[in-house]
Amino acid sequence: MNSGISTGKATLVGLLAILFWSSIVGLIRGVSASLGATGGAALIYTVASLLLLATVGPTRVRAMPRRYLVWGSVLFVAYEMCLALSIGYAHTNRQAIEVGMVNYLWPAMTMVFAILFNGQRARWTIVPGLVLAIGGICWVLGGDAGLELAAMAANVQDNPLSYGLAFAGTLIWASYCTITAKYAEGKNGVTLFFMLTALALWIKYLVVGGEAMRFSAQALIYLALAAAAMGFGYAAWNVGILHGNMTILAGASYFIPVLSAGLAALVLDTPLSLAFWQGAALVCAGSILCWLATRR
């Protein structure tokens, strides 16, 4: 291959990206516990930007389509802020994992947005797929009670900011994916977008204020791991989608919710109930069904 890397190796690199991304929830939570929700996130995206500069390289702004540059920047920054702050603002580690699970409604929503705005054709199975994904989120939010509306409502009311940011993030990322597919023309602005995200978070930290940063060896380890997972995750995914087997990568990506919950539970030493895992499985199943509904 002209790329210098075989399809198999590129696919393996892409699968590593899925592993990196699956660790994000637990690592962001670990950073925010010591460095604060806003300051910790700002540091993560700052270090990740440096890693992306070294791996992916700087973004060639002049070569990027204007619509993608403008809307891609706005949507990417908004999503990453929603993701990081929703996890950082969670009251408990269990809540942070639940918030992360709400974020994984985006694959199903991306398929819906592709149908509505990009003319993507789909079979009728998109409907039960979306119902399954949303039902899985509701199951997770019900806590140990499972699919119980009263328990779900009480859980969300405990911290509407975190859950609201997470849900807003799913819609924003689905919009970003839709815009990217329509206007990006194969260009990749991820390095620039990460730098803009770091800048936005630092502005928020300096203007609005944030929690005090308590640096320690553990905090720095979490920071390094979170930034590496972010930066190397996007870099590895870029290799995978350019030179690897996209069928394998797309299929594997829909198992991120379960893998993410497992890694977060391990990193944060937080046991999860059977009801949580049932909900997570439904989210995966719904996302896969939505994906299959759009396949020819």
Image (tube, rainbow, N blue to C red):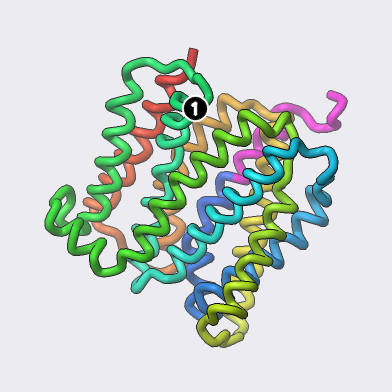
Give the magenta-colored segment's residue range: 1-17
Q: Is the residue 238 above or below the residue 29 in the image?
A: above
Quick one: 217 or 146, which is closer to the camera?
146
Give the x, y percent position of residue 160: 31, 64
- Residue drawn at point x = 50 percent, y = 73 percent: 37
- Residue drawn at point x = 56 percent, y = 51 percent: 21
Give the x, y percent position of residue 33: 48, 77
Give the x, y percent position of residue 158: 25, 69
> In which image quadrant can residue 109 be found?
top left
- Residue drawn at point x = 66 percent, y = 31 percent: 183
Furthest residue toward top: 296
Q: Is residue 106 magenta?
A: no
Question: Is the residue marked by circle 1 packed among few (<14), some (14-19), or many (20+) residues within 10 Å?
Answer: few
Q: Is residue 2 magenta?
A: yes
Task: Judge left or right: residue 185 versus residue 158.
Answer: right
Task: Judge left or right: residue 16 versus residue 28.
Answer: right
Rendered-image quadrant of the N terminus: top right
Secondary structure of residue under mark 1: helix
Q: Amino acid at mark 1?
A: Phe
Give the x, y percent position of residue 54: 82, 56
- Residue drawn at point x = 58 percent, y = 73 percent: 204
Quick one: 97 or 84, which is closer to the camera?
84
Q: Which residue is mark 1?
A: 117
> In which image quadrant can residue 143 be found?
bottom left
